[in-house]
Image (tube, rainbow, N blue to C red):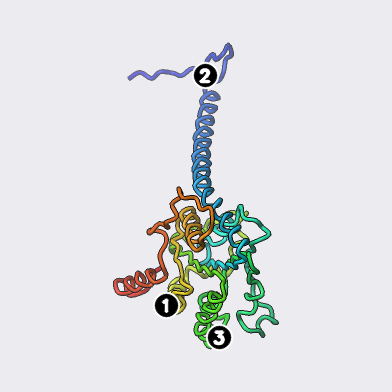
Amino acid sequence: MARVDQPEFIEFEGKNIRLKELLRSYRKLKEDNARHKRKTRKAWKRYRREEELKPYEVELIKMQEQLERTDTRMIILFEGRDAAGKGGAIRRITHYMNEKHYRVVALGRPTEVQRSQWYLQKYVTHFPRGGEIVLFDRSWYNRAMVEPVFGFCTPEEHQNFMRGVVGFEQDLVRQGTILIKLYFSVSRDEQKKRFAIRKNNPLTQWKLSEIDLQMQDLWDEFTQRKYEMLKRTHTSESPWTVIRADNKHRARLNAMKVILCSVDYERRNPHLNYLPDDDVVLSGARELELMRECRVKAGKFEG
């Protein structure tokens, strides 16, 4: 087949333009268009997710108003491994709430004074007044998982906590506090992926600590501590609710549903589906069953 020579210039809108330049401009426009389409799809997906949450965020405001009217206290614990999405869920849940009637508490390492006090004292000082919601981004359950894994407490301190926390929570509930315990469960692969995103993004690198970098290596030890925590502290008075959190949006939506189902508030929207997704939300008892089944099959706990 005879070779056809391409012209160096072509006429376009009355001008002679180099063909190579025109082809280069065409390829750039094609790449820009593809990039724009990806951004548009991503923005549209984010918009649909936010629109799905809004009716439930309206209900959270109604629930908050009910707590204010009845002078009721509410405590919500957000527990789970690092990068499980606890902080993002808290921000979404409180996004439209009245800031005067809720607080988010995320305590750092204990001071020397706090170390000399009763362990739960530093948490009790942040408990809600009547009509207020307090959301703990990690809670006293640090002593059940993080502290024993990293040696931040002695075995005796850990066991003392495990023996006493159930009675402590029963007293809270008996005296009228609504206590909701949420455990955000993320898979090992998803946690690894989120750590990599944090590491490579200068806007989120601050979230990655030396402890975080050890989480993957200590996965099995954390899983064992999780099992022990659920086994000993999941009770009828203060049950654990486990939320599968690999999909952040579904985790946030179902966390909202769990919270809304904990209060019989007025003006509830009858057209909303308040039933949590069975694929996302499990009771602490069901999670224990699944972990035991996994140990029988694989020889160790997973989850």
Q: Are marks 3 and 2 in contact (CB under 8 Å)?
A: no
Location of the N terminus by quadrant is top left
Q: Is residue 147 visible?
A: no
Q: Earlier in the sequence, mark 1 or mark 2?
A: 2
Q: Earlier in the sequence, mark 1 or mark 3?
A: 3
Percent across and percent down for residue 144 are 51, 77
Among the 4 quarters of the image, the one containing residue 75: bottom right
Q: Residues within 10 Å of mark 2 (few under 14, many from 20)?
A: few
In depth, the one of 106 and 94 nearer the eye is 94
Going by the numbered disc 1, the residue's amino acid type is Lys
Q: Nearer the viewer, mark 1 or mark 3?
A: 1
Q: Distance of mark 1 from mark 3, alpha carbons? A: 18 Å
Q: Earlier in the sequence, mark 3 or mark 2?
A: 2
Q: Distance of mark 3 from mark 2, alpha carbons? A: 81 Å
Q: Which residue is mark 2?
A: 8
Disc 1, SS: helix
Q: Which residue is mark 1?
A: 231
Residue 251 — which label? none
Going by the numbered disc 3, the residue's amino acid type is Glu
In depth, the one of 22 and 219 nearer the eye is 219
Question: Which residue lies most toward the bottom here?
Answer: 156
Q: Which residue is mark 3?
A: 157
Disc 2, SS: loop
Q: In the image, what residue occupies the spot 61% across and 57% down?
A: 65
Q: In the image, what residue occupies the spot 52% across and 52% down?
A: 56
Q: In the image, what residue occupies the spot 42% across and 58% down?
A: 276
Q: Distance of mark 1 from mark 2, alpha carbons? A: 77 Å
In depth, the one of 215 and 231 nearer the eye is 231
In depth, the one of 42 and 255 nearer the eye is 255
Q: Nearer the viewer, mark 3 or mark 2?
A: 3
